[in-house]
């Protein structure tokens, strides 16, 4: 996004970011398409607030994003601001809203948004046991020189007290969680990949990215189950999550879900996201840091 616009957005009050489901950057680059989405979004927010009977609806604003340059993908999130506190809290608590006219996810735009829990996705193992993968990842992170490199990266935020760094690093490794993705090759042959999640003990977005990129580039060898390596993120065409492909999306199973379904002819098939750089979390961030947000 345009840096000047991000700065302006950060100054607005009672705001949240709205990401519209099944709305890709190609459509977002067309001004008329984005204007229609903005108008529909404001109308739906108005309905949540009680419609025309609530006079404060007219004061709610919806801002369309501006791309930082002509060569980059056009951002697809919009800013909604001047929302009365009671409705802002309701919208953010519900988070996902499915309406006949539009389906969206609401993201808080503040300094206390946690970093994503999911760091990357591992492939290449022959085992189907997440606990076995967890052991492999744990052993890799605690081995030398990986353990010392993790501590060195964390020290950028927490200082250089060796005792504290060791404790924080061990706590980080213990927070590791592994989630199996049950996938299939063409023809139906099953295979498995694994979401690698952990609570990162850092505060600055640049430090978080440095740590994630270091762990992403590591190899995860095992004498029994092959050598694991990080793979590109997915881009779910239904919910825009990078954590799973469309076929594993659970949103269509939600009662009264009005968004796109697994078989929707109108869904846009997005390419998989290159997760080896900072662009891997585009569209999930906030503010000038462009990457902080909820990853799952």
Image (spheres, rainbow, N blue to C red):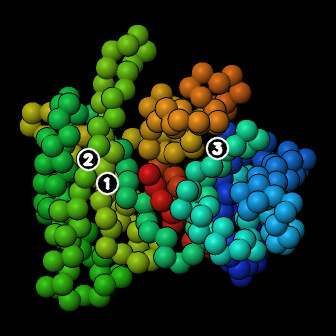
| Vertical comparison of 264 with 202: above or below | above
Label 2: which secondary element: strand
| Vertical comparison of 25 with 46: above or below | above
| Vertical comparison of 49 with 35: above or below | below
Left of 250 or right of it: where is 53? right
Q: Position of residue 208 (x, y in %)?
A: 40, 68
User: Disc 1 marks which residue?
Assistant: 197
User: Disc 3 marks which residue?
Assistant: 98
User: Disc 2 marks which residue?
Assistant: 178
| Spatial separation of the CA atoms under disc 3 and disc 1 | 28 Å
- Tell me the crowding category of disc 2: few under 14, some 14 to 19, or many 20 or more residues within 10 angstroms, Cα based: many
Q: Are marks 2 and 1 in contact (CB under 8 Å)?
A: yes
Among the 4 quarters of the image, the one containing residue 257 = top right
Label located before the other in sequence (3 or 1): 3
Q: Position of residue 187 (x, y in %)?
A: 41, 10
Name the one closer to the observer, 45 or 180.
45
Label located before the other in sequence (2 or 1): 2
Left of 52 or right of it: where is 71? left
Name the one closer to the observer, 269 or 93.
93
Q: Residue furthest front?
A: 53
Q: Position of residue 114 (x, y in %)?
A: 44, 68
Q: Nearer the viewer, mark 3 or mark 1?
A: 3
Left of 160 or right of it: where is 245? right
């Amino acid at each position: 996004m345009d840096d000047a616009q991000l700065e302006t957005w950060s100054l607005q009050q009672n705001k949240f970011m709205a990401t519209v489901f099944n709305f890709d950057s190609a459509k977002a680059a067309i001004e008329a398409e984005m204007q229609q989405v903005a108008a529909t979004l404001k109308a739906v927010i108005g309905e949540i607030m009680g419609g025309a009977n609530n006079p404060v609806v007219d004061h709610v604003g919806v801002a369309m994003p501006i791309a930082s340059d002509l060569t980059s993908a056009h951002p697809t999130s919009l800013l909604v601001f001047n929302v009365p506190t009671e409705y802002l809290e309701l919208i953010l608590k519900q988070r996902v809203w499915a309406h006949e006219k539009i389906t969206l996810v609401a993201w808080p735009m503040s300094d206390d948004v946690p970093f994503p829990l999911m760091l990357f996705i591992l492939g290449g193992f022959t085992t189907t046991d997440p606990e076995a993968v967890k052991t492999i990842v744990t052993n890799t992170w605690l081995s030398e020189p990986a353990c010392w490199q993790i501590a060195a990266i964390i020290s950028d935020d927490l200082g250089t007290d060796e005792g504290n760094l060791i404790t924080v690093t061990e706590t980080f490794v213990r927070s590791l969680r592994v989630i199996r993705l049950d996938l299939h090759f063409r023809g139906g042959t099953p295979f498995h990949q694994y979401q690698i999640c952990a609570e990162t003990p850092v505060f600055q977005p640049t430090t978080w990215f440095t740590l994630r990129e270091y762990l992403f580039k590591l190899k995860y060898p095992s004498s029994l189950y092959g050598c694991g390596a990080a793979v590109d993120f997915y881009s779910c065409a239904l919910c825009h999550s990078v954590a799973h492909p469309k076929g594993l999306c659970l949103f269509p199973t939600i009662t009264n879900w009005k968004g796109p379904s697994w078989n929707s002819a109108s869904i846009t098939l997005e390419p998989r996201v290159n997760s080896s750089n900072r662009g891997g979390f585009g569209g999930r961030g906030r503010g000038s840091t462009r990457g902080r947000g909820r990853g799952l």
